[in-house]
Image (spheres, coloured by chain):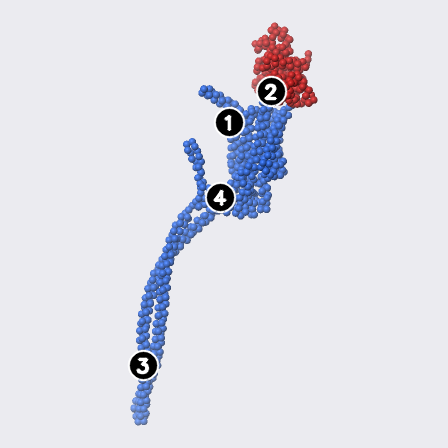
Chain colours: A red, B blue
Amino acid sequence: MTDPIIEFDHVSKQFGDKVVFENANFTIQEGNIVGIVGPSGMGKSTLFRLILGTRKPTNGTVRIAGELSHFRKKVGFASQEYSFYPELHVEENLRYFGKMYNIPTKTLEPRITKLLDLVQLSHARKTKAKDISGGMKRRLDLALALISDPKILILDEPTTGLDVVLRDAIWNVISTIHKEGTTILVASHDLTEIQHYCKSVLFVLDRKIHTQKEMEKIAKTRSKHLEDVFRRVVDVS
Amino acid sequence: MFRRFRASIGKNVKNLFRSWTTLSIIVIGPLTLLFALLIGFSDTGFHHIEIGIVSEQSGVLNTPFVRSLENTARFRYYETTEWERCIIDVQQQDLHLCIEVRGSHVDAFYDPARERVSLMLLSEIRNAVEKHKEDLLRTQTQNFLSDVGNTASLLDKSDEFAGRLQGDLDDAEDDLQLALQDVQQAQTDIDGYIVTLRQRRQKVQRASTELDRISRLDIATARNSLDDLDWQLRGMQTIAQNQQNWVAYDAISDARADLTETRNALFRAETELSSASREVKNVLIEIDNAIVGLQNAKTKLYNAELKIRNAIDTIDDRQKELRYLRQDVQNEKSRLGGIQNTDVNQLVRPIELKVQQIVYEKERVWQWKGDLAEDRADATSIQVWKRFGSTESLIPTILALLVSFIAVILSNIVLLEEIHSKAFLRNTLIPGSRFAYISSILFTTVTVTFIEMCFFLLASVFAFNLRGFGLSSIIAIFLMVLIYSVIGLLIGFVVKNKTTSLLTCVFLLLISILLGGVLFPIERMASYMPFITILIPMTPGISVIQQELFHSVGFWSFWLHFIILGFYSMIALSTLAITAAIMKWRD
């Protein structure tokens, strides 16, 4: 069993009187690929922010790779909306963010080349980001999330709005990244994809972690389908 | 259609007043601006004005002309040998104006870089000069009217005297007429007396002749007779004696004695007659003399008559002249009386400027009345050494406006573009990058704006052939760019909505422009404003540029300005650093 890379110990988050997230208590092992499912507005974004370190928990502790703070460098994030500079080239975006992460040039240039190969954007390195297609933009976002060589990669609905072919392409990239040892958290409404590609799933419901299940165990249940499990979980809540 | 329109109106109004963003634009912004204007312009008299006066006499500070400006400015006295010092103080903006007073001339030296306040001050000085001239004219006019009054009084007295004189002349003429009559009468009397005297003379002459005759002949005859008689008597006496007729002798002796007495008496009578004849002759002479005298007197009387006539004629002429003179005096008195009763103001200020508003239904026009073209030949004048309205004087102002506008808005836009960009989220995830991120935005906007302003300054120097362009202006521009860029960033941090942020920048700039002495001189604002406007970075910045561009003032003269700008820069950067550290990037 690998060491936990993400540890949430009775974590709650409040904004004034409003409880945004309460009593999250779970761990995620290193090298895992975890799907995060739940209805909209249930606290997934807050969960990500707590992991990313942009929000501090009101109660409890969050450890990332064993550290309570200064762990942002270890987490990469690709949000639902693209997060790069449309007027910069693909390569320039990667180079800029790489420099912002203080990655030395000697390390940065080979990493850029490697990432472009990984996300299959080598042919478009000199193209402005705004001029590439939707799927390419998603892949660029992925590459940017990986520029700091994070231990954890958080993907917030990475395939939303893409056609089947592009979805598969994105998941292939995600799988390739996972194979290199990166722990991946994927939030998606597409339960089929989650079931297919993820090893475990976190159900976020009513602003708390309702359930954490391994896919192997779900496969052994009567329903065998994540969707059924999800519906059951929702009905119970 | 109208229902949809009404529904949209309702929705718009609700959106406007339920959103703090739009509410701040509609209410808070204008109120803030209004409040700032009220504070700034609560008193638009002159404040903190310093004027240098160059004159040979320090007593010039007590002249009415200078005293009338005491509410406008403080005055600093310079000897004539310190004239250049006064000009330098104007160039270094320690003074607003330098006035040289030479006799009846006032020369004003002003700073073209501060044209607006200079124009206002010169207007005040012109008004003071006009007032002074008016006062002089008023005094002279009052003296003149007083003299007119005195003249009128004198004319009254003259007229009165002339009247009395005329009366006296009339009396004199009457007297002269009487005298003439008397003279004529005297002449007539004299003629009569002469005739009488002549007649008397004839008589006296006849008497004298008779006396002579008597004296000569009768008395001689009598004497001869007496002598004969006496001879006879003697003879008789002798006879008697011889006859010793002593009775006859005695009788003859007595007779002879009587005869002797008679001869003595005759002798005395002759003597008296001679005397009388001489007296009569003397009387004749006197009568002749009297006649001559009377004739002379008559001649004199005749001459006197002529003179009296002439005098009467002269009196007539003078009376005529005196009548005309009195008529003239009356006319002049009437005229002077009219002048004397004139109001001094009508003579000193015969022209009034009136402004009337005429409203024609929905139109409104202003109508001016009065003729302002009349010039007065006056002893004092203002000579202006340089003409107003030069474009060059606007350069520091335009430069400061450009600096503040571009720096604030550019930095604000760049920051907000960054915050609202797609890449912002990724930037916030990068640990420890905030300082580099923000300082890079600041550096970029400051560099771009600074280079742009330097180009503008350079172009202005060459285009307008300005005198000075040096380190001081560049440093001032740089510091202003830095401070205003930071302000733009701070606004962007606090107000994340693009439109509101931009409008906030504009409001701030408006206040800065209105209260910073750009459009309206600080000296014409409330008296405490200089202490507030010094907080506006534009104010010392403009001052440095003005002094160097137009007067080539040296770098070390601006130490205070640079300290102020440097201090503001430090505060701005510190505030930016603190704000960037504590502000949350995103909700």
Check the image and name the residue furthest to the bottom. B243
Q: Chain of mark 2?
A: A
Q: Secondary structure at mark 4?
A: helix
- Quick check: marks 3 and 1 in contact, CB under 8 Å? no
Q: Secondary structure at mark 2?
A: helix
* Label number found at residue A131: 2
Ranked by sequence position, the earlier of labels 4 and 1 is 1
Identify which residue is drawn at 63% across, 8% down: A217
Tell us which disc is closer to us: 4 or 1.
Answer: 4
Residue occupied by mark 3: B214
Marks 3/1: CA–CA distance: 157 Å
Marks 3/4: CA–CA distance: 113 Å
Q: Secondary structure at mark 1?
A: helix
Q: In which quadrant of the rendered view does residue A143 lie? A: top right
Answer with left or right where residue A26 lies relative to residue B236: right
Q: Quadrant of the C terminus of chain B?
A: top right
- Quick check: marks 4 and 1 in contact, CB under 8 Å? no
